[in-house]
Image (tube, rainbow, N blue to C red):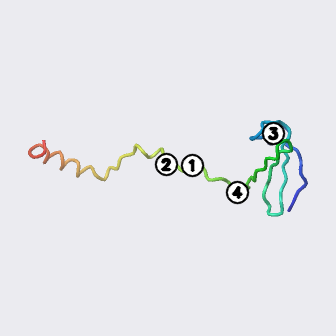
């Protein structure tokens, strides 16, 4: 449901950096919209939680232990052939 526009106290426009110029309202699509009356900036704010960055970076340095036996074999053969 659409809601009347209301100012957000203390909100700063990300475009023009004016304070107390941001109005927030909900449009007919149930989207929350913020609008700057100073510069005309508008932005849709989804109610759905934005997915945080998945924990990709934390796994970069992890090594797989499944290769342990292979490593030992490689070292064993290395002694005579590759080095
Ligand atoms: Zn603005």
Of 68 and 2, the residue lying toward us:
2
Residue 66 position in % (x across, y down): 31, 53
Of 1 and 33, the residue lying toward us:
33
Which residue is denoted by mark 4 in the rendering? 48
Q: Is mark 3 within 8 Å of ligand 1?
A: no
Q: Earlier in the sequence, mark 4 or mark 1?
A: 4
Q: How many marks?
A: 4
Q: Is residue 36 left or right of residue 69?
A: right
Which residue is denoted by mark 2 in the rendering? 56
Which residue is denoted by mark 1 in the rendering? 53
Q: Earlier in the sequence, mark 4 or mark 3?
A: 3
Q: Nearer the viewer, mark 4 or mark 3?
A: 3
Q: Is mark 2 within 8 Å of ligand 1?
A: no
Residue 82 position in % (x across, y down): 13, 45
The reply to whether callout 2 and callout 4 are in contact (CB within 8 Å) is: no
Residue 6 position in % (x across, y down): 89, 48
Which residue is denoted by mark 3 in the rendering? 11
Q: Rounded to the nearest whole Å, what is the CA distance between mark 2 and mark 3?
A: 33 Å
* Quarter where residue 4 is shown: bottom right
The reply to whether callout 1 and callout 2 are in contact (CB within 8 Å) is: yes
Q: Rounded to the nearest whole Å, what is the CA distance between mark 2 and mark 4?
A: 22 Å
Q: Quadrant of ligand 1?
A: top right
Crowding at mark 3 (Cα within 10 Å: few <14, some 14-19, many 20+): some
Residue at the outermost front position = 39
Q: Earlier in the sequence, mark 2 or mark 4?
A: 4
Question: What residue is at 76 percent from the left and 50 percent from the top?
Answer: 43
Residue 79 position in % (x across, y down): 11, 43
Question: What residue is at 79 percent from the left and 47 percent from the top?
Answer: 41
């Amino acid at each position: 449901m659409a809601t009347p526009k209301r100012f957000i106290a203390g909100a700063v426009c990300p475009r023009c950096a004016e304070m107390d110029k941001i109005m927030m309202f909900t449009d007919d699509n149930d989207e929350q919209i913020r609008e700057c009356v100073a510069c005309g900036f508008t932005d849709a704010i989804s109610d759905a939680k934005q997915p945080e960055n998945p924990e990709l970076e934390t796994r970069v340095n992890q090594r797989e232990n499944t290769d342990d036996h292979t490593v030992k074999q490689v070292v064993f053969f290395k002694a005579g052939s590759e080095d």
